[in-house]
Image (cartoon, rainbow, N blue to C red):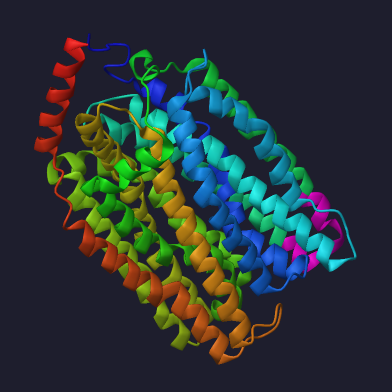
């Protein structure tokens, strides 16, 4: 019979599902915008070494992302195949997050670098244990074409709220760097403890309150190789993988380099949190705008438009390299960040919803539900693209002659502006063009759902 456990997913349940993303958004953004500068300027680890550590973590993701996704799909524990993994993730996330931001005061640079590397590898592995099953759970909560956008839109809203909250910590950290470095470690440790407690509590609450679809939990899957072969052979999934990898290679530099651009190009480091906030606010609060627009114009068309707007917004910031007045630079960045954030709200809402439609296409062909395998593939693409960009950024800054906490040469500023503005522009335009080739529309998805429902009636 067709499962009616979750035919319509209430807005309240969407909030319960999305709430753990507050902790994930807080931790991820703080990692993205501060950890590289923390490593280079506070721990005094060479930029190239930091970039290499992040790149190694992405190589490791090539193993752990697919493994977690596949095991999540196969899990048959009483708590459910997704919620069990959410529960497991709590302890390692807490341990490794604290490792990164509160390393012992080793005088030996090699030991400190090793500690930092283990913390980074462990943190991203632990977040995989949470993120892949959590996204997979979201795809399972509703089979409605547009309701999925609501579920992932709420998740994105909470993720962005967590990201915005991290800016408070970010601001306090950079203020302490400039005014009172002796208290910096204590400030970071206190904020890390609070982040760990809140994240753990929200995950526990979501695990306790949510239910999973029982008709998805007892399906046998092929071996991991076959599962990921199915992902790559799915033409819609393959196109999304290629397009999102290219787009995310460009956008990965944005979070990493915002503080560098604010300090060394704009000349106003203390404005960096406001630049990011001006990006996050429209990203979060535009979700209710994108939901009806996706119904009117189509999810794919809207995603293409938003990706283009993201690229143009950041590409236009290259002009600040040739502006002398600091106030003019600040205004320019704030305006561009607003439009980039607006576009991000669209992509983060409809993107996972489209990915869930692609999973239905696969089920219709193979008879298997492989949300874990699919979202693991996309999760790896996001993190691999970030690793590529971090490696490129680290080596580019070092080769350009970057020296921490000093005025930079024009060559260094030019490299920063190119990586932050022109490179994302090119990547977003290429990604948007590739998405024009995506053909899985609402009508085809409706036919697929009817086919799946008929198959379920016979089982």
Percent across and percent down for residue 393 are 54, 73
Q: Is residue 8 part of the magenta span, yes or no?
A: no
- In the image, residue 328 above or below residue 335: below
From the image, which quarter does the N terminus lie in? top left
Residue toward you, 194 or 351: 351
- In the image, residue 73 above or below residue 29: above
Percent across and percent down for residue 283 are 39, 50
Give the quarter of the image for residue 376: top left
Percent across and percent down for residue 98 are 74, 45
**Count of labels shown?**
0
**Residue 144 visible from this viewpoint:** yes
User: What residue appears at the point 79 percent right and 66 percent down from the top-left corner?
Assistant: 179
**Residue 275 visible from this viewpoint:** no
Q: Is residue 300 left or right of residue 398?
A: left
Percent across and percent down for residue 101 are 74, 52
From the image, which quarter does the C terminus lie in? top left
In the image, farthest residue toward the right: 107
- Main SS of the magenta part reads helix
- In the image, residue 58 above or below residue 151: below
User: What residue appears at the point 57 percent right and 52 percent down from the top-left corner?
Assistant: 60
User: What residue appears at the point 38 percent right and 77 percent down from the top-left corner?
Assistant: 422
In the image, farthest residue toward the top: 1
Residue toward you, 183 or 212: 212
Magenta segment: 175-188
Q: Is residue 184 part of the magenta span, yes or no?
A: yes
Q: Is residue 66 left or right of residue 365?
A: right
Q: Is residue 329 left or right of residue 32?
A: left
């Amino acid at each position: 019979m067709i499962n009616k456990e979750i035919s319509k997913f209430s807005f309240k349940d969407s909030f319960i599902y999305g709430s753990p993303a507050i902790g994930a958004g807080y931790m991820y953004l703080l990692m993205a915008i501060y950890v590289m500068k923390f490593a280079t300027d506070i721990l005094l680890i060479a930029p190239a070494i930091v970039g290499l550590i992040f790149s190694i973590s992405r190589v490791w993701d090539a193993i752990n992302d697919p493994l977690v996704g596949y095991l999540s799909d196969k899990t048959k524990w009483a708590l459910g195949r997704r919620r069990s993994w959410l529960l497991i993730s709590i302890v390692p996330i807490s341990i490794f997050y604290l490792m990164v931001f509160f390393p012992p005061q080793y005088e030996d640079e090699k030991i400190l670098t090793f500690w930092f590397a283990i913390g980074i590898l462990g943190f991203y592995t632990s977040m995989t244990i949470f993120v892949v099953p959590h996204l997979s759970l979201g795809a399972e909560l509703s089979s409605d074409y547009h309701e999925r956008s609501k579920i992932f839109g709420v998740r994105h809203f909470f993720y962005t709220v967590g990201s915005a909250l991290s800016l408070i910590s970010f601001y306090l950290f950079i203020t302490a760097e400039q005014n009172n470095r002796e208290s910096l470690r204590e400030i970071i440790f206190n904020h890390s403890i609070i982040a760990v407690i809140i994240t753990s509590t929200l995950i526990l609450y979501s695990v306790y309150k949510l239910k999973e679809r029982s008709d998805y939990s007892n399906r046998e899957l092929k071996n991991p190789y076959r599962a990921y072969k199915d992902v790559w052979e799915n033409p819609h999934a393959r196109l999304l993988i290629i397009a999102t990898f290219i787009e995310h290679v460009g956008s990965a530099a944005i979070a990493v380099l915002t503080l560098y651009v604010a300090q060394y190009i704009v000349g106003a480091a203390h404005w960096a949190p406001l630049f990011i906030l001006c990006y996050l606010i429209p990203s979060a609060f535009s979700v209710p705008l994108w939901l009806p627009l996706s119904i009117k114009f189509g999810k794919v068309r809207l995603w293409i438009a938003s990706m283009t707007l993201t690229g143009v917004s950041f590409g236009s910031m290259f002009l600040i390299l040739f502006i002398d007045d600091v106030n003019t630079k600040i205004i320019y960045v704030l305006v561009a960040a607003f439009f980039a954030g607006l576009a991000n709200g669209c992509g983060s809402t409809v993107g996972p919803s489209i990915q869930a439609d692609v999973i239905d296409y696969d089920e219709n062909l193979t008879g298997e539900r492989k949300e874990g395998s699919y979202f693991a593939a996309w999760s790896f693409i996001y993190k691999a693209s970030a690793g590529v960009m971090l490696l490129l950024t680290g080596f580019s800054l070092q080769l350009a002659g970057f020296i921490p906490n000093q005025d930079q040469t024009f060559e260094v500023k030019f490299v920063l502006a190119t990586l932050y503005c022109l490179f994302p522009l090119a990547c977003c335009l290429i990604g948007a063009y590739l998405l024009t080739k995506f053909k899985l529309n609402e009508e085809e998805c409706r036919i697929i759902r009817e086919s799946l429902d008929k198959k379920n009636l016979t089982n």
